[in-house]
Amino acid sequence: MEKAVAFIGLVLAVCLFHLNSAAALGVSLNDLYQRTPLTGALAGTVASSVNCKPQGSTRLPVFSMDGDFTIGGIFSIHNYVHTVNNNYTTMPEPVRCSGSMESRELRFSRAMIFAIEQINNSTDLLPGIKLGYQIYDSCASVLVAVHVAFQFLNSLDPVFYIGNNCSQSGMVMAVVGESGSTPSISLSRVISSFNVPQVSHFATCACLSDKQQYPNFFRTIPSDKFQAGALAKMVKHFGWTWIGAVRSDSDYGNNGMASFLEAAQKEGICVEYSVSFYRTHPHSRIQRVADVIRRSTAMVIVAFAAIGDMAILLEELSRKPSPPRQWIGSEAWVTSPELMRYSFCAGAIGFGIPKSLIPGLRDFLLNLSPSQVAASALLTEFWEDAFNCTLKKSAAATKNNVCDGKEDILNLQSPYTDTSQLRITNMVYKAVYAIAHAIHNAVCQRKNITSQCDKLTRLESKQVLNQLKTVNFSQNGYDMSFNDNGDPVAIYELVNWQKSKSGDVKMVSVGLYDASLPVGQEFRINRNITWMEGTAKVPVSVCSASCPPGTRKMLQKGKPICCYDCIPCPEGEISNTTDSSDCLPCHKEFWPNAKRDTCIPKPVEFLSFQDILGIILATFSVLGACLAIITGAVFFYHRTSPIVRANNSELSFLLLISLTLCFLCSLTFIGAPSDWSCMLRHTAFGITFVLCISCVLGKTIVVLMAFKATLPGSNVMKWFGPPQQRMTVVSFTFIQVLICTVWLVLSPPFPIKNLTTYKEKIILECDLGSPVGFWAVLGYIGLLASFCFVLAVLARKLPDNFNEAKFITFSMLIFCAVWITFIPAYVSSPGKFTVVVEIFAILSSSFGLIMCIFAPKCFIILFKPEKNTKKNLMNKNQS
């Protein structure tokens, strides 16, 4: 078989080579015959006796009629050719059609005859000129189509007489057909070399719009380029992103599906599988395609297939129940009533050519007289198949199957007689009228309001080809014109297979697609659609469910982009749309909500007076200040008592005042930071603490000096009397004031929003401005505290009735311990806890001082007054 196909291909290539060579020289076949150089006796009898016969047998048309100008027609009335085993030793038999007849294709051919007869009877279009026709059955075969193409370029007569009076009726002026894209391609390649125009009614392959390869091709049906784009937009419109693809293994199916897949990819649609088949393939191939459909997870199937191929596939699927599928059909099969018997396809939706009305066509189709049927082998076959009887009596015929003349075609239910859905039939009708208008424009001249046509005008097919490019007419309310690619305006009707109450499947128009409308407005639905299994709910066909807001898509390894997992957005990012591929970070002052689908302002955090910690610290601060004031009041009330006078009352009162300020300055750390509070809290803390430590240092020095003064011959106390004590406190405090002043002038503290410590909240805090200034303040306090601690340690064993040196030593030990531990705690504490640590250090050290230095004295004053005497004090000192 493969050798036979290769041989046929080689023969066709040789034929095309010779035809193209002739066309390149600008000659027709008749010109070739006329211009052949003849010599000798043959040249003398050129006009009378020389003739040329075509090789092989002539294929007869199924319908024909002579006319002034002939139009060719070719339709796939049968779907198969009779298989012949050639032995390559004898001349092969003529190719014969086989299989059942396509009644719809028969209707197409009869519609062409109807249009030609209508034109012949018209007084406006080609008046006085009779159009003839030659209509062939291609059997849906490329081989037959090529054979017919050669006959279109010649006469039907078996002998061509060569001379000066050759008839121009040998070559057709134009061709209507073919129904399939693959035969149309082959037909166009043959006849385009001789400028014979071809107007197809059903060949939709986008490849035929290429005027470099098919300069003579026109069509009245839109290109698959538009249909593929419309199907992709429809699939996207209903939210289907996971589909299966089935196509005919032909130019129509392969090119149409390629255009659809390209458009689908742009729309973000993924294809689970893409399989092809053809009606002549082995049954096992069809079974494999059916099994792929049954096993698939895609609920939607887009089928770009011819009606004959689709019928075979649906028949195979009907043998074994399969899960329900939503079928999306191309116009080649979705408008075919013959396929509606497969009820499992109910709910199918697709684009078809808009249905139309052709007045008088139904009467013409039904007007078949017995003589007319008997005279045509094709009509005889149709009649016998339709009524299941035979017209010719034979030995094989019985009384039951002989046609008796009572057959009523008016009541025949057949695609041939069904004119309720005239779609492609109207394309045939318009194709004939387009050719007629082109011939009219070439041979007729308009005078006044009428046209006069000269049927003796020598008309070349090239003239018809040129006129076809500019035709623009309206017939039965339908406009017709061709663009630069030979295509009409793309208008589709959205059809839906809906089950009626009786259970029958009917085709219902539910929408329209008009490619001439602005982008985004081409597609509209005007009524409800019934989906698979008769439901009104749009089926879902996705590889992965939609990712809700707050998540993003992560592609699954090794699978198409429509297959993904939904993962939550990372911390600090959101997605506020469905099926988001990326998450977007929030602004630095915002944070995602719990669902991570919107950004909300971050909560602002600072140590406020409403916080539990703030309340506790503020309470202790106030209590500490009150305790210092009460202590001062006690001391003031008992200022003449020996214990108060013996403990340097002036420094004690100054120390109590500084401790009160220390307690109160911790309140400046609570509340929302501001420019003033930031500057005040650190400087007030630094100065009051230095004042406090200066007083403690003064008391320590006084203790040391007092012990030295008791030694014989000592005159120390006159060098450290009250003036010197005051000067010491003022000097030490002034140094801290100077440090704070320089700090505030050069780089003062200021409030900031801390966005780095916590991602989900904002910390309001005070920036130090200059860390050097802050640590200089703390360093100076630490230096004084260390000096005071050393002196206190030296004085701890001095004889003292009230153990003043020991209490100072212990208080400074607490003070130093607190502030030594403060440094790492301050550095490592996050957010508002930094402020808490600082307040805690202030309160701890302040309470340590007041409790160690003043608590024992207050206890004696209040609860042991018998010990608060000069005698007791002097006795202790003497011992």
Image: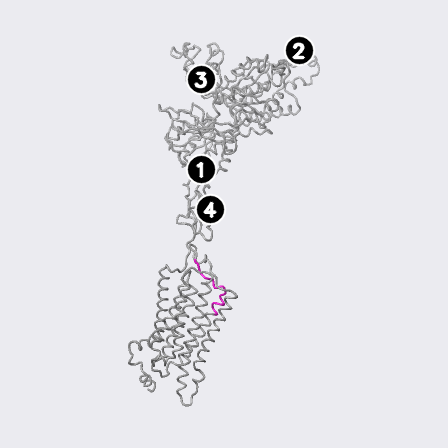
Type of the residue with mark 2: Ser
In-image side of 603 versus 71 (left or right): left
C-alpha span from label 1 to label 3: 40 Å
Residue 683, placed above or below residue 39: below
Residue 510 x/y as whole percent: 43, 28
Between 707 and 778, the residue placed more toward the observer is 707
State the residue at coordinates (41%, 82%): 704
User: Which label's residue is closer to the chain start, 1 or 3?
Assistant: 1
Query: Which numbered disc covers residue 417?
Result: 3
Residue 93 seen by the camera:
no
Between 312 and 663, the residue placed more toward the observer is 663
C-alpha span from label 1 to label 2: 73 Å
C-beta proximity under 8 Å, tags 1 and 4: no
User: Which label's residue is closer to the chain start, 3 or 4?
Assistant: 3
Helix, strand or loop for disc 3: loop
Q: Which of marks 3 and 2 is in front?
A: 3
Mark 1, residue position: 241
User: Which label's residue is closer to the chain start, 1 or 2?
Assistant: 2
Q: Which of marks 2 and 4 is in front?
A: 4
Residue 85 x/y as whole percent: 50, 23
Mark 2, residue position: 48
User: Which label's residue is closer to the chain start, 2 or 4?
Assistant: 2
